[in-house]
Amino acid sequence: MKPIVMRLVAAACLAGAASARADNGELAKLQDEFQRAQQKFFEEYQAGGEYDAKKHPAVEFMPRFRAFAEANAGKPEAIQALLWIMQSSGMTGQDKALSMNTARWALKQLEENHLADAGLAGAVPQMRHLAWQIGGERLAAFYEKVIKKNPSDEAKASAMFNLADIKHDADEAKAAEKLLRTIVSDYPTTKAAEQAGRFIFEIEHLQIGMKAPDFVGEDVHGNEIKLSQFHGNVVVIDFWGFW
């Protein structure tokens, strides 16, 4: 895939995740219509067409999603429309400032009309990678309000997790670790607690200079081997995966 659209495709995938969570009402139809238009847009591009962000379907659909969000302000169904706006604001060919203003408008609507809505539990995890569209400080302020005012443990824990991510990126490692440990201790049954637990394990066991934890794998012949079998030898461990 051509590098120029990598970030836009990532945003499109996030928008698609929001679509999967909508009900079978007006918003679902709007999301489905957008997905079909976007698929056609990228198919034409991959077939050799010239990429023009100003012709991306998000340009046409942005005012429609905004109208839906405004018409349903305060109702749970508006949350997914606002999430779509935040995720898709960078796909419209606007300059950075205008794109950010669009995303921040949607975030403001969440703050003013949905801060105490339990439906944020499904939206907040999808907001984790929106700092480049909204700004880390602005998102952090929103997450702190969710933690204080939302009744859902899932929403609170997800907001803490996202806030920890922002703190980590801002080189505030101690503050990030404190948030992760709070999630595990105060909201142990949430999905965010599972994620936080993995990061805590990394902090406690996978830092430079620490002894590598023992693990089991298979050699090229399918025989079980353990890292501890090679104690005293020079071992190179190659980590890889698909994303």
Image (tube, rainbow, N blue to C red):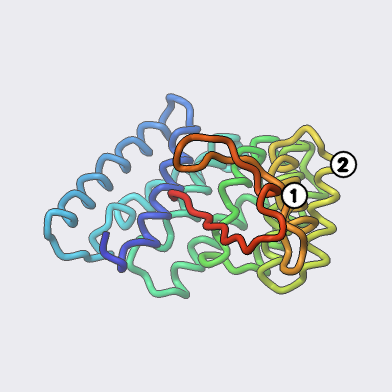
Residue drawn at (27%, 57%) of the image: 56
- CA gap between label 2 and label 1 equals 15 Å
User: Which residue in the protein does label 2 denote?
Assistant: 186
Q: Is residue 122 left or right of residue 38?
A: right
Q: Residues within 10 Å of mark 2 (few under 14, many from 20)?
A: few
Mark in front: 2 vs 1: 2
Residue drawn at (38%, 38%) of the image: 31
Judged from the image, the secondary structure of the residue bearing numbered disc 1 is: helix
Q: Is residue 24 left or right of residue 111?
A: left
Amino acid at pointer 2: Asp
Residue drawn at (60%, 54%) of the image: 128
How many circles with numbers are drawn on the protein?
Answer: 2
Which mark identifies residue 40? none
Q: Is residue 148 left or right of residue 233?
A: right
Q: Position of residue 233 (x, y in %)?
A: 66, 61
For residue 26, above or below residue 103: above
- Furthest toward the front, the residue is 232
Which mark identifies residue 146? 1
Is there a contact, CB below 8 Å, between mark 2 and mark 1? no
- Furthest toward the left, the residue is 48
| Quadrant in the picture for residue 11 | bottom left
Residue drawn at (63%, 40%) of the image: 216
Name the residue nearer the viewer: 136 or 190.
Answer: 190
Name the residue nearer the viewer: 191 or 25.
Answer: 191
Amino acid at pointer 1: Val
User: Closer to the N terminus: mark 2 or mark 1?
Assistant: 1
Q: Residues within 10 Å of mark 1 (few under 14, many from 20)?
A: many
For residue 132, above or below residue 38: below
Q: Position of residue 104 (x, y in %)?
A: 56, 62
Q: Position of residue 183 (x, y in %)?
A: 81, 46
Q: Is residue 96 left or right of residue 149?
A: left
The quadrant of the picture occupied by the N terminus is bottom left
